[in-house]
Amino acid sequence: MALWDLANSDVITVMGSNMAENHPVAFRFVTQAQQRGATVIHVDPRFTRTSALADIHAPIRSGTDIAFLGGIIRYILFEDKWFRDFALAYTNLTTIIEDAYSGAEDNDGVFSGFQPTNASYQQDSWQYKAEMVPPAIEEHYAQVERGTADRAEELTRHPPPRDRTLQHPNCVYQIMRRHYARYTPEMVERVTGCSRDTFLRVCEAITKNAGRERTGAFCYAVGWTHHAFGVQIIRAASIIQGLLGNIGRPGGGILALRGHCSIQGSTDIPTLYNMLPTYLPQPNAYDPHGSLEEFLETETVPTGWWNNLPKYMVSLLKAWYGANANAGNGFCYDFVPKLSGDHSQLPMTLAMVEGVVKGQFVLGQNPVVGAVNSELVQRGMAKLEWLVVRDFAMTETANFWLKGGLVQSRELSPQQIGTEVFFLPSAMAAEKEGTLTNTTRLVQWHDKVCDPPGDSRSDLWFIYHLGQRLKQLYADSAESRDAAIQALTWEYPVSGPTAEPDAAAVLREINGYTVADRKQLKSFQQLKDDGSTACGGWMYSGIFPDQHENRSRARKADGPDGNGAHQGWAFAWPDNRRTLYNRASADPDGIPWSERKRLIWWDEEQARWTGNDTPDFVPGKPPTMRPDWAKQPHGMEALGGDDPFIMEADGKCMLFVPSGLKDGPLPTYYEPVESPVANVMYGQQTNPAARLWVRPGNELHEPQDPRYPYVFTTYRLTELHCGGISSRVTPHTAELQPEAFVEVSPELAGELGIRNLDWTVLTTARGSVEVKALVTERLRPFMIDGKRVHQVGMPWVFGWEGYAHGAIANVLLAIYGDPNTSIHTTKALTCALRKGRLPQPEPAERG
Amino acid sequence: MANEPARAALAAIDTLLADRPEKIGHDFSEATRRLTAWRAHCIARWRRTQAKEDRQRLDQVNAAISVVLGGQFPLGRVNWDSIESVRRALGDL
């Protein structure tokens, strides 16, 4: 959904986010909705400015989100509050799952297929009965069993087995009823600490604002993602929205509030190790990906939109390798790096500590402040031979060797750190041109206002010239390993005294063009798999449809008489669609569910989908179209005119996920890896598939460890942006938040004898920090299953650079990951807290 | 090839193959560290000699690190066949 579409919501639940303080621009649409009569709910451990503006604040213990959301799912199912016509038609609620499936309720917290020896799941028993459902392709890295491609062909022979009476014991509806039966309001209170009454008020507000006439939205940030089960928290919200019909409709959806201004763009054209641009899978050395042919045969989903993968992949290779790529050499597929394991940031940090990694580039990041287990990160950096840091002000990452924690504690001296650090000045946003892609896929161009000072250069300049130098370095090499760099197309026009590359030329390449005559493509529908088109990112295709038409520059907003989609304002991928899956805004016959919530509909006269948005559907496919199974249809031919979820193999909203998730087909409540209490839902304490990398310097706390009795969470501040540097070096923002602090409830402060502004020491197995206490009623203790549990919170945005100093909260955190994303945990762990200060190290000897 | 870093790395991989730890994490560290030390040795030697066979040895040890690191931080199950294959190849050096 578009940010501004929040204003059309009838109920907005902000959870896992302090939206008013950290996303104030987006939050104005929440207040607009509220002014129109919407109910705003804030579910959060702390009472923040978001809570103050909400109609309902529901405090929960950090990390208990799935218990809360699972409770809502139970309420919807058991109180029969689901949007029946929507869910029966558009979700997999009626689909029958394999007989061998057994749920977490049968196995004390784990699903069938769990393999304790390697803490992973075999997913065969989660499949649709007698059919293997391949995962949506962006979830590829979740590992698909060998032989899937053949079994997936079943999807082209008949529709998945369904029971519209919902009586079959293994239909998704019955499975979900069994799974969520224990998530009662009383259980929600025992686990989360939120009172039963408040919880039920939330349930009522959400469900009464659903159906044909009303819609609701969820807004979340890293308060959901930064857990060892973060993906499943978001999944739980997806189930709620699927059951209530809040997807593809005005005011309905789930809004991921991204933490940086273009972090969505860096996911689309990814800085992620496991994806090629616009969500194509990165080949894996251990999968049947030996050749392009084998890769495409394995990875192409037979049914649904992702059946177009070969067109996107071949066009990407043509964009990268140009004339060197042809059908005879697999379009240079061999040059694409193959995964051999988890190469994400957390394991690579550990690999640095092992001495495996020799050098590192750090652009747009400050990992000494922003990455978990900061001192282990610094230990890894101290083992590098070289480190390149680009930023516009000195960062803790660039001078860890001089002022870092290991140096301050005298464990290492600068002379003992052999890392050669190159600190290069970078241009700020206004000093370069380019695009920003925001949380709702909206790509907006920005011009350069002025030149950067001195030797400062844009990141584009740096990457382009680095590439040019590498190409020159290897130009005469006869080594096969250098052929990939030799073959790479790296030709962008440059201008000015600094030879700045043309950012528009990069965007033109991402958009795609015909190879023969270099004509810009109008949209991704023109892409081919024969090498005649090149495209750097299929989802962005259409953003630059002519040589001189850059749609990300468009700035025409709707007036009062517009339809509210603002389609003349910038470009939303794909194809300028503002609301994904918007076919679901009409009923199976193509008629809007209601006049109030209409978005697109089937125009019988024109035989097309039409309305207030670009249809996210085949434009001329009538609602009545049904696959002709006798012809064994593939691609979109295998989905009917009433299957809105075109990126899924069966065209349905997946309430139950048969493939692609590493920790279960349904969200299940586990305690955080570090927790002061036992899991009262199941015998299984924590996510059994979580990625734990326990090693010296990265020890974890056992559940209920009395040495670490308090729940600890971290967060950002309005006044200090992201890792803090940009605003800590600016006096007028630094003085608004001059130093680090820990928020402590009056109750805990009383128990520990801490007064406001006293020094305190926070300790975990990873390290200790000292900060002043902010004693505040914004945090209150929770009663968890009869036990009083205290929670403390600390901003993670401080460091030793700039005008606003303070302890780095991430010193306290550990490196472990969500099994699906390897994302770290920053929102729920445990710690110790005492009044006082850390012992001061002995003065260094004069030499 | 007979040198201490190589012997230590091969012994560590042998231990790994004998134990076959399935859970990701610390169990692989010894093999990774020993291979890394062997690589440092190979780098120093190649920089000294510039000999083709020393470069090839460095390439193979580097490739072995990729495979063992992929076992230490796997995306699915540990690929023991590849680690066995790497051990055989390194033994031939």
Image (cartoon, rainbow, N blue to C red):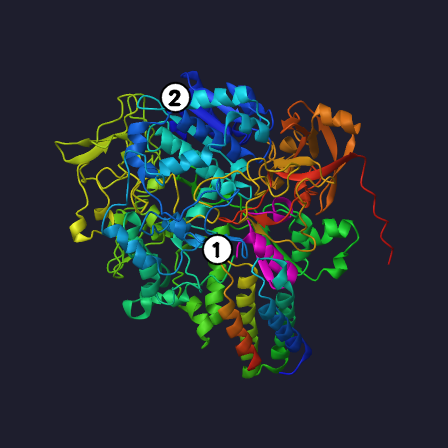
Mark 1 and mark 2 lie on one chain; the one further toward the N terminus is 2
> Helix, strand or loop at disc 1?
loop
Cα distance, mark 1 to mark 2? 40 Å
Q: Position of residue A300 (x, y in %)?
A: 31, 56
- Name the residue nearer the viewer: A111 or A137: A111
The vertical placement of A153 against A571, above or below, is: below
Around disc 1, counting alpha carbons within 10 Å, would you say few (fewer than 14), some (14 to 19), or many (20 or more)? some
**Residue that label 2 marks:** A209
In this image, A752 relative to A584: left or right?
right
The vertical placement of B52 against A354, above or below, is: below
- In the rendered image, residue A345 lying in the magenta stretch gets the answer yes
- Name the residue nearer the viewer: A691 or A323: A691
The vertical placement of A469 against A744, above or below, is: below
In this image, A243 relative to B43: left or right?
left
**Residue that label 1 marks:** A273
Q: Is residue A822 visible?
A: yes
The residue under label 1 is which amino acid type?
Tyr
In this image, A798 relative to A391: left or right?
right
Chain assignment, label 1 = A
- Name the residue nearer the viewer: B50 or A760: A760
Around disc 2, counting alpha carbons within 10 Å, would you say few (fewer than 14), some (14 to 19), or many (20 or more)? many
Q: Which residues are magenta?
A: A343-371
> Helix, strand or loop at disc 2?
loop
Q: Residue at x 55, y 75 (%)?
A: B87
User: Residue A570 appears in which quarter of the rendering?
Assistant: top left
